[in-house]
Image (cartoon, rainbow, N blue to C red):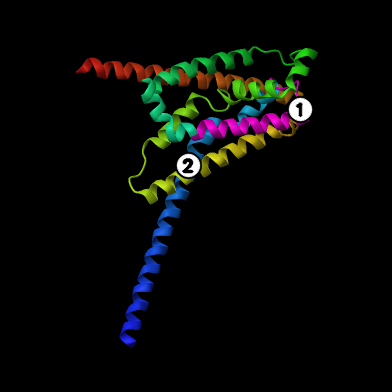
């Protein structure tokens, strides 16, 4: 009887040890995926660098409208990054599109926006009609998505990275669940930082003053233009490389 009890206790301890090891492995994979998603997406999304452009594009909004707009942008960013991570590759395959093609089109749009911001006056006059329209929910929703969410915050570079993150899924169900939860948590962290930087962009840039804000805005617009050129070039290089591979056979 005593031997049977000891055998049950040993089996219980082995099962508990295996359970703890499995949980630690899953948590490690979840944490590594979270860190990878944040490290890959945050520098490209760059919400702190986009704060001056956000303020320049929303100078006609009230404080309450800023809060609602930043919330809408955060929701849009979360949706775009989540969809790109989990089904982005399947969507591209369905339409017969490649990541280089997305980079070329998106890079051209980013270049155009960066160039227009670079040449925009420091204090653009705001018409009263536009100010009235800006507080309507429909106009806030429109402005929240384009151009503030896409391509200024989540552009073709961010979408390409998100698709790459979700392209290689693990085989086992437990690892797939841990990886998926890690991606969701990492995207949530990035989106939270976007919301905070945009919601309190005026307070962040107030420390810089008018001259400092103008300098940061011009510098950020120039960096945005350079990012657009780089994304466009990466897409062209990818298309040329695929053309060479196709003609090489």
Determine the residue positioned at 64% across, 35% down: 195
Residue drawn at x 58%, y 19% as measured from the top left: 222
**Could you tell whether 121 is left or right of 28 in the image?**
right
Q: Quadrant of residue 190?
A: top right
**Residue most extreme to the front:** 1
> Within the image, what quadrant is residue 1 found in?
bottom left
Residue 71 drawn at (x, y percent): 66, 33
Left or right side of 18 for 133: right
Vertical side of 9 occupied by 93: above or below: above
196 in the magenta segment: no
Q: Quadrant of residue 15?
A: bottom left
Q: Residue at x 47, y 50 (%)?
A: 31
Percent coordinates x, y for residue 75 in the rendering = 60, 33
Q: Secondary structure at mark 2?
A: helix
Asked if the magenta segment contains residue 66, the reply would be yes
Q: Is residue 71 above or below residue 61?
A: below
**Residue 41 showing in the rendered view:** yes
Which residue is at a point 69% across and 20% down the rendered structure image? 139
Residue segment shown in magenta: 57-82
Relative to 99, residue 17 above or below: below
* Nearer the observer, 241 or 172: 172
Q: Earlier in the sequence, mark 1 or mark 2?
A: 2
Disc 2 packing (10 Å; few <14; some 14–19; many ≥20): many
The tag on residue 111 is: none
| Mark 1, secondary structure of its residue | helix
Q: Which residue is mark 2?
A: 183
Numbered circle sitting on residue 209 = 1
């Amino acid at each position: 009887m005593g031997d049977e009890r000891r055998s049950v206790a040993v089996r219980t301890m082995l099962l508990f040890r295996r359970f703890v090891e499995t949980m630690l492995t899953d948590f490690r994979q979840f944490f590594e995926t979270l860190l990878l998603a944040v490290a890959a997406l945050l520098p490209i999304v760059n919400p702190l660098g986009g704060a001056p452009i956000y303020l320049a594009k929303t100078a006609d909004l009230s404080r309450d409208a800023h809060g609602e707009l930043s919330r809408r942008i955060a929701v849009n960013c979360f949706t775009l990054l989540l969809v790109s991570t989990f089904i982005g590759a399947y969507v591209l395959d369905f339409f017969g599109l490649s990541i280089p093609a997305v980079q070329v089109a998106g890079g051209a749009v980013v270049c155009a926006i960066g160039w227009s911001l670079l040449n925009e006056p420091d204090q653009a006059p705001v018409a009263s009609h536009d100010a009235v329209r800006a507080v309507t929910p429909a106009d806030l929703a429109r402005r929240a998505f384009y151009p503030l969410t896409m391509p200024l915050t989540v552009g073709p570079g961010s979408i390409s990275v998100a698709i790459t993150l979700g392209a290689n899924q693990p085989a086992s169900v437990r690892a797939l669940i841990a990886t998926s939860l890690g991606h969701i948590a990492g995207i949530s962290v990035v989106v939270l930082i976007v919301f905070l930087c945009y919601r309190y962009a005026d307070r962040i840039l107030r420390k810089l003053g008018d001259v400092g804000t103008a300098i940061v805005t011009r510098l950020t617009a120039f960096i945005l233009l350079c990012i657009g050129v780089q994304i466009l070039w990466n897409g062209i290089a990818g298309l040329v490389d695929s053309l060479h591979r196709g003609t090489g056979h």
